[in-house]
Image (tube, grey):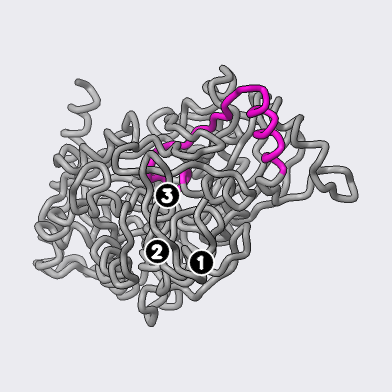
């Protein structure tokens, strides 16, 4: 009750100050550097945004704490959610106006995989930020075979090739090898599957009648909420997991597991979370949508500016219980450009968390297409689609037009630099081979990309409980 009363009182004061400011401008007693035109005022100024307790919700926390939302005339409440499904459902019903989302969530909802709803994203929240951790027992089985550096420490990146003998040993003993990921359409699910498959380990298919994702699987992947990952690993329910920070570092600090690879090493500078809203919200409240995007861009810039000079302040904010609520030391490990694998084996990973540089905030169509290819690869998209379909869905969900308009306004107001934005892009990144398996990805050619994988569905194939059916193109590897 008291926090609500305080919010209402604070909000009333803020609105009164805003009215006084507008009056001062009108009568000429105050001349700001930049004043919003009347038609740019937010149509809805009281907003509630959801998030999951992960480091990469940082742009929301910073936009709130540093006053960037208020600068745009927005009065925001941030509310942690129990899990990704609850978060998405509450955005769809309007209980939340928007949320920190998995990159795959707006895409999956829009194509009707799971809950059907048209969700869009005008803002990409970050690059990288995840890791894959295994239990101490599994690590001890992997470690003797790993290549070593001159100082005796394991050489990174560590490929899943070194996990494969462990899984085969489990199989001969009649044991299943269980691993956790945070949601069926999460980056974590697709990164874990990508890493496993690159090492010759089948992570399993989905089918229209079996959404476990475990058809033909050699490693059984299931959902575990991020904050519960370390405890589930410690209990022996799972033997490894893929999750965002600070939950990999928590395993190190607790002495219960070892991170074997970061997602930066699986796919260099991969897009991670996005900010999601309904298409209806964006259409009904266009000024509000631009204002939200502006505030988030400024927050992301603050997080990366001056060579991450603000990161320790961000760590202190994120460690508070209303945000991530984890030990500040654990959050700082990754947020300040380092990552600890085994206890004491801390290495420089300057781009583990990227929020603004490398055009991290721009919602690229090619990022959306990559996620769609992985949904198709593992059977979440049941039928073959032409390249044009991937482009169409990407443009329906990812909205660089909103982003660019917000960026233009920020440049005009002097908050950001013109050089910070990819004005000339058509929404597609250049083709890249910066993956753990070295396979080139070109966002304009998703079907060709899928054809290169030894494990996974190809064009013309589908999956049922009995396995894969349909003939792959002659140039493609047979699906397994």
Residue bearing the label numbered 1:
476
Q: Which residues are magenta?
A: 162-189
Q: Residue 415's x, y, as percent?
A: 37, 67
Q: Residue at x 42, y 49 (%)?
A: 468
- What's the distance in space between the residues labelled 2 and 3, CA to CA? 12 Å
Residue bearing the label numbered 3:
468
Tell me if mark 2 has few (under 14), some (14-19) or many (20+) residues whose alpha carbon lies within 10 angstroms of its own.
Answer: many
Query: Residue 459 has which mark?
Result: 2
* Along the line of sight, the residue nearer the viewer: 469 or 114: 469
The answer to whether 110 is drawn above or below residue 222 in the figure is: below
Q: Is residue 12 visible in the rendered structure shown here?
A: no
Q: Residue 67's x, y, as percent?
A: 33, 50
Q: What is the quadrant of residue 205 in the picture?
A: top left
Is 437 situated left or right of 467 in this image? Answer: right
Q: Secondary structure at mark 2?
A: loop
Label 2 close to label 3 by CB (< 8 Å): no
Query: Residue 22 has which mark?
Result: none
Q: Is residue 139 magenta?
A: no
* Along the line of sight, the residue nearer the viewer: 320 or 368: 368
């Amino acid at each position: 009750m008291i926090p609500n009363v305080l919010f209402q009182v604070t909000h009333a004061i803020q609105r009164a100050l805003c009215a006084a400011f507008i009056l001062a401008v009108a009568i000429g007693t105050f001349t700001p550097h930049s004043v919003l035109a009347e038609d740019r005022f937010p149509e809805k100024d009281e907003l509630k945004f959801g998030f999951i307790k992960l480091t990469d919700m940082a742009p929301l926390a910073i936009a709130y704490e540093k006053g960037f939302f208020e600068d745009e005339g927005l009065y925001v409440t941030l509310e942690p959610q129990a899990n990704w499904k609850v978060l998405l459902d509450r955005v769809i019903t309007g209980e939340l106006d928007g949320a920190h989302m998995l990159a795959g969530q707006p895409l999956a909802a829009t194509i009707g995989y799971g809950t059907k709803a048209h969700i869009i994203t005008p803002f990409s929240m970050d690059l990288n930020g995840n890791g894959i951790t295994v239990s101490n027992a599994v690590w001890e089985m992997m470690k003797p075979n790993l290549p070593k550096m001159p100082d005796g420490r394991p050489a990174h990146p560590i490929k899943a090739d070194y996990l494969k003998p462990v899984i085969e040993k489990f199989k001969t003993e009649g044991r299943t090898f269980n691993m956790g990921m945070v949601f069926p359409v999460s980056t974590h699910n697709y990164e874990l599957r990508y890493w496993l498959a690159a090492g010759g380990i089948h992570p399993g298919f989905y089918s229209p009648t079996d959404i476990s994702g475990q058809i033909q699987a050699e490693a059984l992947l299931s959902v575990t909420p991020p904050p519960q990952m370390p405890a589930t690993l410690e209990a022996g329910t799972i033997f490894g997991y893929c999750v965002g920070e600070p939950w990999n570092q928590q395993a190190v600090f607790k002495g219960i597991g070892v991170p074997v690879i970061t997602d930066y090493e699986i796919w260099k500078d991969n897009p991670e979370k996005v900010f999601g809203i309904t298409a209806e919200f964006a259409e009904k409240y266009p000024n509000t949508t631009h204002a939200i995007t502006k505030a988030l861009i400024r927050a992301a810039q603050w997080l990366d500016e001056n060579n991450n000079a603000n990161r320790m302040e961000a760590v202190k904010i994120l460690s508070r219980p209303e945000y991530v609520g984890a030990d500040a030391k654990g959050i700082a490990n990754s947020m300040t450009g380092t990552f600890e694998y085994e206890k004491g084996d801390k290495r420089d990973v300057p781009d583990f968390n990227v929020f603004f540089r490398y055009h991290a905030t721009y919602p690229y169509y090619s990022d959306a297409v990559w996620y769609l290819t992985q949904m198709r690869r593992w059977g979440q998209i049941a039928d073959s689609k032409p390249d044009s379909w991937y482009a169409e869905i990407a443009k329906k969900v990812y909205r660089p037009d909103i982003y660019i308009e917000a960026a233009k306004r920020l440049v005009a107001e002097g908050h950001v630099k013109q050089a910070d934005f990819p004005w000339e892009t058509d929404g597609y990144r250049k083709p890249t081979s910066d993956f753990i398996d070295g396979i080139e990805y070109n966002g304009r050619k998703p079907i060709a990309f899928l054809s290169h994988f030894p494990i996974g569905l190809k064009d013309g194939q589908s999956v049922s409980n009995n396995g894969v059916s349909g003939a792959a193109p002659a140039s493609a590897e047979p699906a397994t």
